[in-house]
């Protein structure tokens, strides 16, 4: 008796064909995703190089101009002081950039561990606030509300950089002379809360997830007005991870953002 296997074979071939087609589609989609990610990373690195070059060039050019003017012109003492203090601000900007690039390089090195010591966190925040206050606005901008003498066991250089990055951002992404609140509170025996709140542009919910990525900056290079490299919050997140601390971003009312850091077992 002759059995007709044709329909069964056809079904098998169609089934196998469909299976391979699905694998092919899945592979193509994954490849597209990888290419898109790679392209995005390349673009961000390109942006980073552009902004670092700009960030290096513009303060150098301005310091050069200030010094040339002081040398060539007969300026009175007040004018000289103004030019010198502006040069100092530019040098501080350079210092901030170099510090961020250096710290990022260190954090990327797996063998590097942060050297920890006991230091007064309240004093660190107060020093950063005073320095930024002097540089940015003559009227009151930064309002610190700090518990006294909070001593933490941490890497002083890296934690100072975290405070600096959060506070510089709060000022940078706010209108001139807008108020910035800084809080440091012992919330329980071994928990510490540090927060920086501003009344600036705020951050959309979608962007909140992305801003801690390396080189990530909201908007694009051609429309963006603020200076920066996209390294600040990446450093903040990485340093805090190495200190058993977490960071949350919330909306401030009526506008702006609150960056809230919680340290666990901060004294040990
Ligand atoms: P940048 O050098 O661009 O400031 P950061 O890593 O510090 O890099 O921040 C990443 C992005 O997050 C910024 O480009 C900015 O768009 C956004 N951002 C950070 N802090 C604030 C803030 N306080 N208010 C609004 N946007 C912010």
Image (cartoon, rainbow, N blue to C red):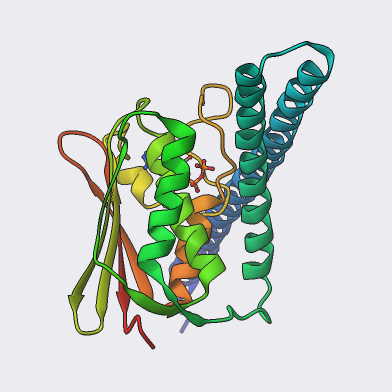
**Residue at the (35%, 65%) spot, across then down:** 122
Q: Position of residue 92 (x, y in %)?
A: 62, 42
Q: Is residue 7 left or right of residue 44?
A: left
Task: Examine the rendering and report whether any part of residue 96 can be seen.
Answer: yes
Q: Quadrant of residue 240?
A: bottom left
In the rendered image of this protein, does residue 192 appear above or below residue 223? below
What residue is at 84 percent from the left and 14 percent from the top?
72
Q: Nearer the viewer, residue 52 or 217?
A: 52
* Rendered location of residue 87, percent (x, y): 67, 31
Left of 168 or right of it: where is 264?
left
For the point 44% across and 35% down, the residue is 172
Task: Tell me where residue 64 appears, x and y as whole percent.
Answer: 79, 26
Left or right placement of residue 26 versus residue 104 in this view: left
Ligand 1 shown in quarter: top left
Task: Pick whichever, 1 or 198, lies toward us.
Answer: 198
Total labels: the figure holds 0
- On the rendered image, what quadrant is the C terminus found in? bottom left
Q: Position of residue 139 (x, y in %)?
A: 33, 29
- Of residues 220 and 95, the one nearer the viewer is 95
Q: Is residue 262 above or below residue 191?
A: above
125 w.r.t. 266: above or below: above
Viewer-side residue, 171 vs 67: 67
**For the point 52% across and 71% down, which residue is it?**
156
């Amino acid at each position: 008796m002759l059995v007709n296997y044709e329909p069964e074979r056809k079904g098998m071939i169609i089934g196998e064909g469909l299976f391979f087609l699905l694998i092919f589609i899945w592979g193509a989609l994954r490849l597209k995703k990888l290419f898109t990610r790679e392209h995005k990373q390349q673009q961000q690195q390109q942006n980073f190089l552009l902004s670092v070059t700009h960030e290096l060039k513009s303060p150098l050019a301005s310091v050069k101009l200030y010094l040339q003017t002081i040398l060539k012109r007969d300026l009175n003492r007040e004018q000289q002081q103004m030019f010198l203090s502006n040069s100092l601000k530019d040098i501080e900007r350079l210092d901030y950039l170099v510090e961020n690039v250096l710290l990022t390089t260190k954090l990327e090195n797996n063998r590097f561990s942060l050297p920890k010591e006991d230091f007064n966190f309240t004093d660190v925040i107060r020093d950063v606030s005073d320095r930024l206050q002097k540089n940015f606005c003559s009227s009151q901008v930064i309002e610190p509300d700090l518990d006294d003498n909070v001593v933490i066991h941490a890497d002083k250089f890296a934690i100072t950089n975290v405070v600096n990055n959060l506070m510089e951002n709060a000022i940078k992404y706010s209108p001139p002379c807008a108020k910035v609140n800084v809080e440091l509170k012992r919330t329980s025996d071994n928990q510490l809360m540090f927060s920086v709140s501003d009344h600036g542009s705020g951050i959309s919910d979608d962007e909140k997830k992305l801003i801690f990525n390396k080189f990530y900056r909201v908007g694009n290079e051609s429309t963006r007005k603020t200076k920066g490299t996209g390294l600040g919050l990446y450093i903040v997140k990485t340093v805090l991870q190495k200190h058993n601390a977490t960071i949350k971003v919330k909306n401030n009312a009526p506008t702006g953002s609150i960056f809230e850091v919680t340290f666990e077992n901060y004294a040990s």
